[in-house]
Amino acid sequence: MITTQITTEEKGKAFKSQRKPEVIDKQKLNVRYHIEDFDVNDRPRRFLESFAAILKHSNYKIALDHFIRMSAKCSRCAVTCQVYQATGDLKDIPCYRTELLLKVYRRHFTVGGMLKGRLVGIGYLTDGDIQEMAESFWNCTACRRCVNDCPSGIDHGLVTHLGRYILSEIGIAPKALVVSTREQLEGATGNTSAIPLPALIDSLEFLEEEMFDEKTVHIKFPLDVKNADYVFFPAVSDFLMEADTLMGIAAVFTATGDSWTTGKGYFDGINYGLFYSDRILERVVKKIDVETRRLKGKNVLIGECGHASRTAKYYLPGYCGGKDALPVINIMEYTHKAWKEGKLKLDPNVIREKVAYHDPCNLARQKWIIDKPREILKSFCKNYIEMAPRGEDNICCGGGGGTVSIDEIRPYRTTIGGKLKADQIRNAGCEILVAPCANCKKQLKELVEDQGIECEVIGLHDLIYKAIIFDKSLIVENKEEEAKEEE
Amino acid sequence: MDQWLEFTRGPLFRLCFVIMILGLLRILILDFIGAVKLYRSVADKTIPWKLVLSRTLQWLFPIKKIGRSRPVYSVISILFHIGLLIVPIFLFAHVKLWESSVGTSWITLPFAAAYVLTLSTVAFGLLLFLGRVFNKSSSFISRKQDYIWPLLLLIPFLTGFICAHLNISPAFYSFTMLIHILTGNMIFVLIPFTKIAHCVLMPFSQIINTLAWKFPPDTDKAICKTLNKEGVPV
């Protein structure tokens, strides 16, 4: 996939900061994302203390030692990185970004580096280094595509993840993520979108009525059901912005007849910890475990969301009981199984547009979910087309790594981060782009809008909802009479 | 000169070779201990062995990776590595030296193959060096050792070729051979302490990465305690 670099004019627009100069002066940090006020004094020392604390209580040291011995600087990652391909700025090469943190580690946490540093008297971490890291680590979409092209096997995504984590410990993290997480962990509503429970219940009742009107089937969103097979955690923003996806999921469960529920105590799959702090990651994952066990649910079911699925799938066992942890599945795995078993019937005459599938990085990079949604789509979309590259080599939507939630950097995301994806969508000529991830969906909708591409971005279950064929026994014959009876 | 030659290919070679072996063993053991420690500290013990193994093999035999990124560079790099590994290990003269000192020998390269491989390795090494100098993304991220290594590796190849294939005076032969052995010895010593350590560490990158993404439990409390952040809001 070849792309062209952006023009100087586009670059100016993409990098334009919305932050006021007085805030930049006050915080002594010139980055494009908003940051809550933090202690600006003595940052290098506090950065190193945080780095030391994290190294002491985690396993990053082993990986960092491996990386500093291995790095061959071949620059293959430069070709793979969609940010560098768009900007042409050498500082966007993944290997350069990784070196920003590795040189701090080498200088301050290895014997050789400390000796050399003291002898030569150079290399001590400065405010300038912190400024560069704060900017660089959030230019990256954390898609980890470069990892697949590094012969040395250096995981640039892991280093960026760690760099953001250390920065967050000294107060440098995007305000959008911090505020949402605070509401999720310490706020009254307990979720990142600050949806009060009564509002959620109202929304779901409204959706149930709408689905009955459309399908004449009683499709329910069961709430707080004990002993359900599946306890459902979508990206909570879906309740506000992706109702069609949720309706599709409810429709699938109505067709299969399996028991599922959404908990009233906690119903948010989003975990911004993956993007900036392992401490947050752990606390949020534990909330999912607590809620599922409160309801005595058998499985954790994550909705159409890449990072929510990855955090639950890979960190629930790590933080909540190892091999005794609750099983985690993504909704597409469930739907695929139901479809394979013949419990889900889809009308092949409903969707006639050209449909393509976008792989969310958090589902595809580790080869977790790649073919299952495609098999479902091909079964009922007559004009399904494949985009290349795909699967584990997919191109990121451009809003990965939490950047999609930072609204003030939208011009950056849709001009630089998503440039390669926009070119891919344009070349494919698809009319419908299926993106089974809340983050990808938001980013891709903004991307096609800003780039002027005629393409509708929706979830997999949005399409399933349109094409689903219910068993006759589920269809209410005389809808009006039943409605009157209910009244 | 003869005494110098005897010393450099005798005691000095043995010392340098032992330093290399011990140095590589050290980093291998450190990597292994690290991986075991990592595995023990995490609660999630599942490892996608199939994926780890397939990705490791894909990089050990990177034929499929050629076309993905920088194809010309990748082909040159692969051919360079082939010559770099095969010539020193299977060269007839080297095998004979091993046989005379430790009594063990193995198959050797035919004369013509050694000739071609030596020259091609020199050529590919030079191309890699030039690529590093003139490719703007490569040169931007390069350190001193990244420029020095291709050139340093070429010296024993070039001097070895001169000694083996060119008709030169005995004095020049001895001098060239001395350079050949000295640079070879120097390379042995430097391998474990520079990026060339990837010759033994590379097969472990995928498993280290997989394990590194598994985080140990309860770090939240421990880090908060260390940084005096207990009870501090998000």
Image: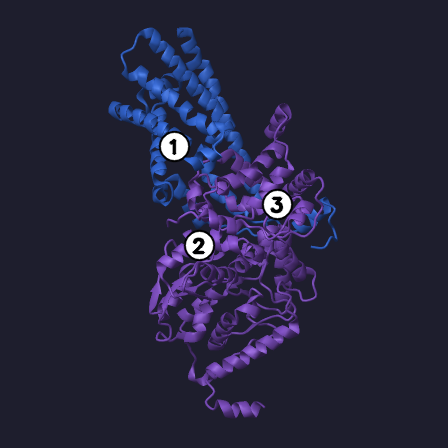
Chain colours: A purple, B blue
- The residues tagged by marks 2 and 1 sit, at their Cα atoms, a distance apart of 33 Å
Task: Tell me residue A210's x, y (percent).
Answer: 52, 80
Q: Nearer the viewer, mark 1 or mark 3?
A: 3
- The residues tagged by marks 1 and 3 sit, at their Cα atoms, a distance apart of 35 Å
Instruction: Tell me which residue sits at (44%, 17%) in the image.
Output: B13
Amino acid type at circle 3 is Asn
Amino acid type at circle 1 is Gly
The chain under label 2 reads A
Instruction: Tell me which residue sits at (64%, 71%) in the image.
Output: A264
How many C-alpha atoms fall within 10 Å of the one at disc 2: few (<14), some, or many (≥20)? some
In the rendered image, is residue A368 in sight? yes
Q: Which residue is mark 1?
A: B131
Instruction: Tell me which residue sits at (56%, 46%) in the image.
Output: A137
- Confirm whether circles 1 and 3 share one chain: no
Task: Tell me residue A400's x, y (percent).
Answer: 51, 54
Task: Tell me residue A61's x, y (percent).
Answer: 59, 40
In the rendered image, is residue B212 in sight? no
A96 sits to left or right of A393: right
- Confirm whether circles 2 and 1 share one chain: no
A1 sits to left or right of A232: left
Quadrant housing residue B58? top left
Q: Which residue is mark 3?
A: A30
On residue A241, the disc is none
How many C-alpha atoms fall within 10 Å of the one at disc 3: few (<14), some, or many (≥20)? some
Q: Identify the secondary structure beneath mark 1.
A: helix
Q: Which residue is mark 2?
A: A367
